[in-house]
Image (spheres, grey):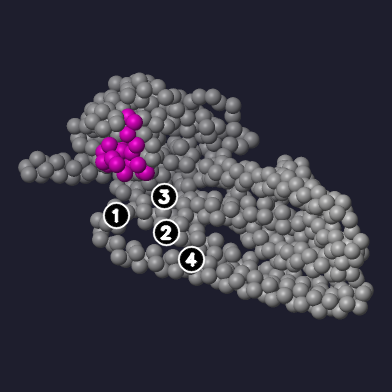
Amino acid sequence: MNQSSLDIKRAGFTNSFYMKKFFKKYLLNYILGVIALIIVDVAQTRVPIIVGNVIDGIGAANISMLSIKSSIVTLFIIAGVMYVGRILWRYFIFGTSRNIEKDIRNDMFSHLEKMSATFYHKHTPGEIMAYMTNDLDAVRMTLSQGILTLFDVIALGTLTLFNMVTKIDPILTVAAVIPLVLIALTTKIMGKEMFSRFSGRQEAFAELSDFVQERLSGIKVIKSFVQESKTIASFEKTNKNAYDKNMKLMKLQTLMNPFMQLVSGIALAIAIGYGGIITINGRITLGDFTAFISYLGMLVWPMMAIGMAINIFTMGAASLQRIEDILNEPIEISDSKRTLSINSITGDVQVVNMSYKYPKTEKYVLENVSFSIKKGQTLGIIGRTGSGKTTLVNLILRIFEPDENTIYINNTDILDIPLEVLRKNIGYVPQDNFLFSDTVANNIDFGLRSGDMDKIIGAAKAAVVHDNIADFKEGYSTVVGERGTALSGGQKQRISIARALIKNPEILILDDSVSAVDTDTEEKILEHLHRDRMGKTNIIIAHRISTIQNADLIIVLDDGKIAEKGTHTELLKSKGLYHSIYEKQLLEKMLEEQE
């Protein structure tokens, strides 16, 4: 029994610093569950003795009906105690494991929400889903079935052996138990291989989950490029890998069960052979022999359970290690000791000699960028694809972490502004226009959670999408589907704009957010911005000069550097890159009109 405890400890589960807080929190529940389990085991081990005494009494013809009735009543009482006890240990042990599973899942989700974009470049959605499902399920099994098996092995095994040795025959006990020790030794040897194969299975599941999630998200692209057959072939390959890893684990588990039954059969044969001889010789009674066979049947379970417990704890330790690896990932962007007690910000933005490169890269995405805008002004940003426009606004949002003393809002370094305050006061419309699988109203109201339909409709009108929504069969109650699949590109963009506008933020950032709408709709949106956001700051990234030509300041990014900056008129006069883009777009517009 002690060996199994040592093996489980080596598996790394009970040594986990993270798990200790849960054991401390739910210690009373586990104590009550273990007490109920021990009561059941004590009651269970009384049955063979009672039955053996009745058999001896009948054989000797010296037992009364009163004694038989008393034994029957006692067996019924034992059955009732075992029934209640099993309900209690299931409630306290299995129920507690579900509570801990819930707590760990909450911890994981809370931690994942704090992680930076860099983290999600390293870990795919499918991989994270594997942690949240399969791995967490393995940990829960350890906290329920594993702990139950561990204490049942110790309690039932100890009580059974004690009764076999003290109440029947110690030599017979040793002879019958020796083969059962092989079960514990075999499972101990196989534990390391079980750990390795289980980890491989979990990794294969993560790969499969990620493949399915990614391909289903991009199903329109797959269909439009007629790549169904190649995608199916790729899936079959990934699925085959998961199948192979599962079968590899199952083969090991399949070998163990017949072996355990074989050893149990050998132990039973020894017990019947030797036990029969000493019963005939009169060293033990027929009742004792019957009780011994019953005890031997009880002892097979603890011996088998030693291996089960080791396997469960081994798989749980492998999964817990994967979960802890995620929870131990450092939060790269967070408030610090230097963070000030600021409750609000206004729209004065200043960028001073800012340079930035992505982690583990050498090339600067932005280099020596400087500009400033006052509250109520509009900044236009334009430049070729890959010039650093989106990276710039992500730094203002602290999606990426800028260097100290490079970005100021209200003359305060943004590293000193609480993250929640910074982001609450900025409305952001990203390029990908992500919408949740929810109603149109809830998507617009996502940042405010007000439930105020007047505000929701007002924001939709400002984003020039109200009429489109009104035409939907269920209006604002229309569920848009995952990532807004039920909407056109322009509708998604405008609902995303409405989601930012309803916050009435001090700073509004539009990252190429009107590229999918026609020029007339674009003009209406810009008119609403100009009229409704007086005194508020706007930062607009665009590819079309028409979108930003009325901005108070325009910066032209080229290869991460500011090539030019000024007003629309000033930039046209300078005859630089901005003028070149303007001339090209003007020509394209003329050609379109001629068609």
In this figure, which residue is indicated by the disc labeled 1?
221
Can you tell which of label 1 and label 3 is closer to the viewer?
1
The residues bearing labels 4 and 2 have C-alpha atoms spaced at a distance of 12 Å
In this figure, which residue is indicated by the disc labeled 4?
242
In this figure, which residue is indicated by the disc labeled 2?
211
Instruction: From the top left corner, tell me how far across and down residue 568 is, in percent.
Output: 25, 33
Upstream in sequence: badge 2 or badge 3 = 2
Residue 227 lies in quadrant: bottom left
Q: Is residue 296 above or below residue 553?
A: below
Can you tell which of label 1 and label 4 is closer to the viewer?
4
Upstream in sequence: badge 1 or badge 3 = 1
Instruction: From the top left corner, tell me how far across and down residue 554 is, in percent.
Output: 31, 35
Upstream in sequence: badge 4 or badge 2 = 2
Can you tell which of label 2 and label 3 is closer to the viewer?
2
The residues bearing labels 4 and 3 have C-alpha atoms spaced at a distance of 39 Å
Q: Is mark 1 in CB contact (under 8 Å) with mark 3? A: no
Q: Is residue 507 above or below residue 102?
A: above
Q: Is mark 1 in CB contact (under 8 Å) with mark 2? A: no
**Residue at the location (90% across, 66% down)?**
60
Q: Which residues are magenta?
A: 476-493
For label 2, the SS is helix
Magenta region includes residue 492: yes
Upstream in sequence: badge 1 or badge 4 = 1
